[in-house]
Amino acid sequence: MATTVTKTEPIVGKGVRRKEDPRLITGTATYVDDIEMPGMRYAAILRSPHAAAKILRIETSAAAAHPGVVAVFTGDDTRDVGPVPCAASLPGLRAPEHKVLATDRVYYVGHPVAVVVAADRYVAQDALDLIEVEYEPQPAVADPEKALEPGAPAVHPEWPDNRAFTYQHEGGDAAKAFAEADVVVKQRIVSQRLIPTAMETRGVVAAWDAGMRTLTLHSSTQIPHLMRSLVAAMVGMPENRLRVVTPEVGGGFGSKLNVYAEEALLAWISMRIGKPVKWIESRRENYQATIHGRGHVDYYELAARKDGTILGLKAKIIQDCGAYHQLLTPAIPTLSLLMAPGIYRFRNVSAEIIGVFTNCVPTDAYRGAGRPEATHCIERMVDLLAAELKMDPAEIRLKNFPGPDEFPFETGTGLSYDSGDYAAPLKKAMEIAGYEGLREEQRRARNEGRFLGIGISTYGEICALGPSSALPAGGWESATVRVEPSGKVTVATGTSPHGQGEETSFAQIVADELGVDLDDVEVIHGDTGIVQYGIGTFGSRTLAVGGTAIHYACQDLKTKIKQWGAMLLESDDVRFEGGACVCNKTGKSVPLAEIAAAAYRALKLPPGAEPGLVATRFWEPSNFTFPFGAHIAVTEVDPETGQVEIKRYVAVDDCGRIINPLLVAGQIHGGVAQGLGQALYEEAVYDENGQLVTGELMDYAVPKATMVPHIESSHTETPSPVNPLGVKGVGEAGTIGCSPAVVNSVVDALSPLGVKHIDMPLTPEKLWRLIAKGGQA
Amino acid sequence: MKTEISVTINGEAHTHEVEPRLLLIHYLRDVVGLKGPHIGCETSICGACTVAVNGKAVKACTMFAVQADGAEILTVEGLAENGKLHPLQEAFWNEHALQCGFCTPGMLMTAKELLQRNPNPTEEEIRHGLEGNLCRCTGYQHIVSAVKAAAARMGG
């Protein structure tokens, strides 16, 4: 329940209801498909029905002649547009040229082949059916391990081994750790391909202004400024004549942390036809042509002493890249490697990533981006080790955490964990769940032949992305805080929130710093025409990096405010407090609104000061932040149906200092639901020919309200020393913590049958078969 | 060939000539200009397009505009009366039952019908009642709380 507060008490830390919501609950918000412009045309895209084929011929004349059609374009027309960019670089990376429309070959189902521009969306769709494409289908490969086999079809003929890259890391001495170990557990673990499924699909409205020679690109994206730079390069126009506007964005989860062919294509079309043009992705296109997430086959080995002390880890990570590299594709599994040791003390790590081309849509960042895969693996391995040593999974974790006095903690993968007390959330979660009692209940259930499981995951994550040196693009963030002449405050952030609620949490920070009402602070974002350059919203960075830039801009502003206050109070000893400058000697005060009026009227200036009350900061973080937590899932498997019932779900998350507990709860709930989707329900399935079988919401199980349990959410609060707010980030925590807790729980439930590991998703069919075969896979 | 239809939307009478194949959702959004109901799938799974047709929650992406001829339609834009938010809107705001907001208009309309049928639903009944509306952001927990809170406020 939200609380109402007045400016006399701090607002940071309060669960105030969101400033964003009035427009969203009344149907008055503007998403990209809501934009109308005079003379606007509609684009529809013809996509490949084949996973691999040569294009022999494209016949567009019937489509072009169809009444209402303005233009039809193919890859021949767009040779000078693009290529679609990949910002990540790795040594030896093979990067296929990624054109905006296919020319002589298609590489995945959904590959764009031609575009129709018409007077309305129905006509555009009609005309698509009139385009004739003659394909010569080629052998395709959709499974990353099969793609690595000798003789597999080559996705890109120039690289017959289908290897996009290999990347290795040695930390400590893994060979020695394994030689000295009493026990080694090994497991192949799959983190299946997922479809992000933002409820709003992608969409673009491009509007060329011939008079001003400027282009405005409205796009449903998480990164407006990066998009401006990259699309300007793709269409060959000066960056300062391209304006990217991000309207309301209906969810992203990483799938809109990208620059796609369609953004440049629509920009180019608008310039070409001299009219505004709109393209809205259908759900089928969204499933075929927007990035997927995960797509790992991992081989892990964990070495330990017989007392449960973990000594080292060997990991081989096979990343299904898909047919191309999208913006960050090759970088995603490097995050898995960084996160591979989880939150345990051992430092001996030997890891290898093999990036593989397949005839599938590219994988890229999806909520957690590399970290859920790593966490799933290490948390499964720790449970396998516990089972091998007949130890309790909680006990083995508590034994291997670094202590709170060991921070900053240097990992075997080159990270420096900022702060933590890893035992605290686990102990708290065990207390909330009643762990001992649950084990007792489990013993009773087992005696009755019931499959009751208790699963623990203790996760860490890499958030607040991040130091610029560690990222493919800059990792800093920008903020402008402006006190307007009336005393109202405008904040322009370079981040691009799209549901996370930073219009509210940023306003809370500013309201406290400047002593103004929450309602007097407006936060603007997502328009390169009015906001200074920024990086965007992803990697649980918006509050920790973007909020910190705002914090520092407020400090600069307060220095200026005090200069003006001192002049107006005719005193050299003033403080700024409660929205006013106060003379420490006389107690006289002048409110912010009066100071602002004087600063803009500028009849007299303080010594060395300029008119106006504006401060802009670009803040570069010195490190990532490292949130952590513990989730406990209690499940029961029905042997008759294979159905998993989540009986309890306890989440104790430490995301550093909490600015708005209501928003934090929302992020945890939503994150857990997506982790649960991976654990139990969701899988992007390509058949052996590379045909996407789960091509609609009809076939892909996004969790419904009945499929998600009530989440018992709680927190510990360990401030981050990386930023002055002490915040760490919470956008991905729920997703990262959830899937191993659920899978560990179900494996625990079925362990009396000798089950040691099950790959996700844990569908009723999979579990029913497993139980029917007495636990033998 | 176009057909004339007359509908009452949020209390206002509208008459238009429409193609028989025009979906109700496109009629509402593109012809009438009501952008509140959204399109999330076009296959009647996600529920973002839900509106009330003659008092019943209907997915407007799987109904033709001509089928709505003569009907009384309520969209999210018509929920608030005289500038006063509907108790469901107020509860969604108070309970943080939305994040990106894309599913919200449909979710509100389905919840409204649910409370008409069952003014005092249990958590399980709420979850079942909202099964036809997908939300990818909230994990549904705050939506369930909001529907409960609205039911209490509406005297269920």
Image (cartoon, coloured by chain):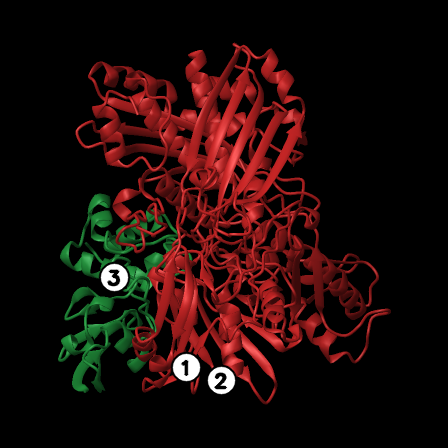
Which residue is rendered at x = 46% and y = 61% of the image?
A105
Residue at which label 3 appears: B43
| Neighbour tally class for label 2: few under 14, some 14-19, many 20 plus, Cα within 10 Å | some
Residue A29 visible from this viewpoint: no
Question: Residue A724: x and y, percent?
Answer: 67, 46
Name the spot of residue B145 as percent of width and height, x first: 31, 49
**Mark 1 is on which residue type?**
Arg
Mark 3 closeness class: few <14, some 14–19, many ≥20 residues within 10 Å: some
Compared with A294, A553 (above or below) is below
Q: Point out which mark residue A273 bears.
A: 2
Name which residue lies at 48% across and 39% down.
A148
Q: Which quadrant of the figure has residue A533?
A: bottom right
Residue B35, image quadrant: bottom left
Residue closer to the observer: A596 or A284:
A284
Rendered image quadrant of residue A448: top left
Q: Which mark is residue A41?
A: 1
Q: CA distance from mark 1 to mark 3?
A: 24 Å
Q: Are marks 2 and 1 on the same chain?
A: yes
Q: Which chain is green?
A: B
